[in-house]
């Protein structure tokens, strides 16, 4: 394009020189000017913004963080700039993970670790984020390309690997442990792991890594029919791990590639994935920046616009050994934590004014306290809130898929042993 325009300019110049009558040179000069302007347009390539040393609250058009820092002025977040200290690992850079990565990048997160083994395909274009010209690139490389343009302040690490393979899992573990970004950080090298994968095995791998590292993580999923989804907070030992509780609405446990080979195609909508990514990153921001209430579980049923919430306690008979260790540790620190939380609540209650906000109540409006979440015990299988169904077997059923005899909840080990013996003799 640039070369062609230069040739046109040269042709116009020769035409001008060849004319005996100089009165025609003015319109030719005008034409040359227009072509030069077109040639200059081609020079406007992608302009990358320079890095910003400190986040500023200054309200000017050139400040990429002015609207985010305004959260402090509005009293929502105490210290927004602390977001630059956090590392978030995103496993699965698909319809949910890529959008979550973009949101965190635009929010100015300190460091993002991106994991995926797949490549960008035209079949991904019904979702957000990836562009047709990125087809054939690995999802992690394409993501780094886009995200580093959007915000060069974010430290991006791209891992093209499959965490369900032995080698992939080892690299995943060591990357989570790496503390070079913030050497004095307690625990692992990341503040949160976000699972945005589409299959059961990968979720179990994230669960295993996080239980071993005592790493808080959030799980997300979208149903195979594309109309519902969920996010879930998992704190090892404190809440149910992925092996403790039968997973709720998640896509099929079958690998996406197998689905394609068999000619079966799971549906996906940019809307549902965008909503789930939004809920996931909102919960992430609340967790990291300490504002609002962090949801332990939040479902989304788009057909009824129904958002169920609940809490899930860990299963003392969980099949994951690391989960049981974390549960023991949690029970030891729980009394002290409960006492501190109670003291804080009482202090807040005594500080709050007792007088009602509005003395007149012309419309007879009453306020219903809805902060009590539905608490579900994972051991009672039929205690799910209305509208929620289990789409996958529990972890234990998954391990012994041939066992057809239903196992009822065992009250003690003797019962369990008897049931196992009965199963083995059958
Ligand atoms: Zn567990």
Image (cartoon, grey):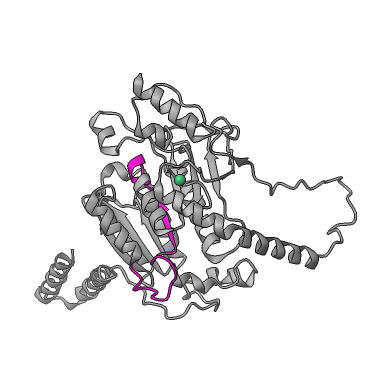
Q: Residue at x 26, y 59 (%)?
A: 171
Horizontal side of 424 relative to 82 (left or right) equals left
Between 73 and 321, which is closer to the camera in this rendering?
321
Q: Is residue 127 above or below residue 76?
A: above
Between 346 and 337, which is closer to the camera in this rendering?
337
Q: Residue at x 38, y 55 (%)?
A: 212
Q: Is residue 365 above or below residue 417?
A: below
Q: How many marks?
A: 0
Between 219 and 45, which is closer to the camera in this rendering?
219
Q: Is residue 207 visible?
A: yes
- Which residue, as the protein is rendered here, is positioned at the far top? 426
Instruction: State the quadrant of the N terminus.
Output: bottom left
Magenta span: 178-203
Image quarter for ligand 1 = top left
Q: Residue at x 54, y 46 (%)?
A: 297
Q: Is residue 2 above or below residue 272?
A: below
Instruction: State the quadrant of the C terminus.
Output: top left
| Residue 198 within the magenta-colored segment of the rendering | yes
Q: Residue at x 55, y 76 (%)?
A: 59
Question: Where does residue 179 sit, x and y in percent of width and height?
Answer: 36, 71
Q: Is residue 138 visible?
A: no
Snapshot quadrant of residue 334: bottom right
| Residue 125 within the magenta-colored segment of the rendering | no
Main SS of the magenta part reads loop
- Which residue, as the protein is rendered here, is positioned at the far bottom? 53
Question: Where does residue 289 sit, x and y in percent of width and height?
Answer: 54, 66
Q: Is residue 83 above or below residue 398?
A: below
Question: Where does residue 374 sit, x and y in percent of width and height?
Answer: 64, 41
Between 347 and 106, which is closer to the camera in this rendering?
347
């Amino acid at each position: 394009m640039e070369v062609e325009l230069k040739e046109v300019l040269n042709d116009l110049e020769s035409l001008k020189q060849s004319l005996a009558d100089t009165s025609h040179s003015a319109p030719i000069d005008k034409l040359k000017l227009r072509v030069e302007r077109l040639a200059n347009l081609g020079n406007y390539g992608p302009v990358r913004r320079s890095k910003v040393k400190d986040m500023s609250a200054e309200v000017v058009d050139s400040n990429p963080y002015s609207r985010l820092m305004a959260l402090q002025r509005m009293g929502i977040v105490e210290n927004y700039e602390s977001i630059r200290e956090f590392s978030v690992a995103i496993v699965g850079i698909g319809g949910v993970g890529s959008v979550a990565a973009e949101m965190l990048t635009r929010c100015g997160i300190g460091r993002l670790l991106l994991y995926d083994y797949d490549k960008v395909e035209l079949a991904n274009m019904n979702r957000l984020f990836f562009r047709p010209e990125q087809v054939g690139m690995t999802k992690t490389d394409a993501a780094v390309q886009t995200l580093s343009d959007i915000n060069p302040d974010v430290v991006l690490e791209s891992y093209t690997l499959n965490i369900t393979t032995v080698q992939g899992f080892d690299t995943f573990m060591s990357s989570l442990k790496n503390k070079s970004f913030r050497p004095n950080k307690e625990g692992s090298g990341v503040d949160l792991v976000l699972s945005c994968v589409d299959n059961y095995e990968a979720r179990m791998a994230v669960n295993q890594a996080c239980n071993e590292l005592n790493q808080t993580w959030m799980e997300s999923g979208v149903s195979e029919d594309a109309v519902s989804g969920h996010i879930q907070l998992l704190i090892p030992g404190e809440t149910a791990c992925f092996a403790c509780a039968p997973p709720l609405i998640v896509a099929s446990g079958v690998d996406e590639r197998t689905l394609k080979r068999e000619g079966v195609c799971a549906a996906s909508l940019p809307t549902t994935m965008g909503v789930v990514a939004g809920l996931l990153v909102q919960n992430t921001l609340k967790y990291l920046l300490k504002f609002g209430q962090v949801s332990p579980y939040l479902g989304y049923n788009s057909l009824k616009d129904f958002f169920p919430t609940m809490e899930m306690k860990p299963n003392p008979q969980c099949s994951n050994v690391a989960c049981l260790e974390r549960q023991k540790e949690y029970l030891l620190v729980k009394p002290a934590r409960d006492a501190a939380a109670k003291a804080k609540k009482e202090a807040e209650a005594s500080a709050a004014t007792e007088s009602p906000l509005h003395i007149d109540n012309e419309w007879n409006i009453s306020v219903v306290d809805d902060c009590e979440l539905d608490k579900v015990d994972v051991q009672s299988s039929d205690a799910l809130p209305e509208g929620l169904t289990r789409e996958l077997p529990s972890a234990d059923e998954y391990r012994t898929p041939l066992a057809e005899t239903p196992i009822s909840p065992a009250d003690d080990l003797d019962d369990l042993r008897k049931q196992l013996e009965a199963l083995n003799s059958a």
